[in-house]
Amino acid sequence: MKEPLGRAEAEEYASWFKALADATRIQLVSLLARRREPMTVGEIVEVSGVGQSTVSHHLKILAEVRFVLVERRGTSSLYRINENCVSCFPTAADVVMGKPVPEPPVCD
């Protein structure tokens, strides 16, 4: 029998799932993952059709769990997908569901 998931690991994965438990945040992650290049809030608003304050709010949540990285350039902020987190997210789901994986994912 396998050992249960450790508390710290479970809390990390829960924060990821919680961050993705919103349709707008899923849209923003998808947009940034497909673009594969940094975007300003204004560019994201234009493409997504979601208001500026809503986009900013959701990007903040996504940045807190490191799905999105922020690069400051002068007075502007550029947002891009964190490739490490996107690539390890499916593995995190496998770990939670008890599927064997080579090693636990780490989102940096």
Image (spheres, rainbow, N blue to C red):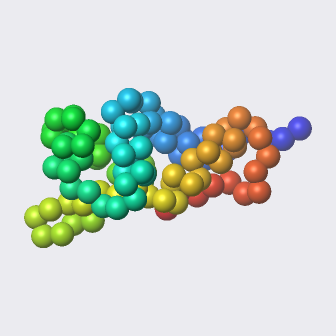
Q: Position of residue 104 (x, y in %)?
A: 68, 54
Count every numbered label the image shows and give the total. Answer: 0
Front residue of 108/49: it is 49
Q: Quadrant of the N terminus?
A: top right
Question: Is 85 left or right of 43, judged from the image as shown?
Answer: right
Q: Residue furthest bottom?
A: 74
> Is residue 80 visible in this depiction of the protein?
yes
Relative height, residue 72 to residue 95 (above, below) = below
Q: Position of residue 79 (x, y in %)?
A: 29, 57
Q: Position of residue 39 (x, y in %)?
A: 26, 57
- Image quadrant where residue 10 sits: top right
Front residue of 32/9: it is 32
> What residue appears at the point 38 percent right and 29 percent down from the top-left corner?
23
Front residue of 65/7: it is 65
> Is residue 57 visible in this depiction of the protein?
no
Q: Residue furthest right?
A: 1
Q: Position of residue 4 (x, y in %)?
A: 75, 39
> What residue appears at the point 34 percent right and 61 percent down from the top-left corner?
37
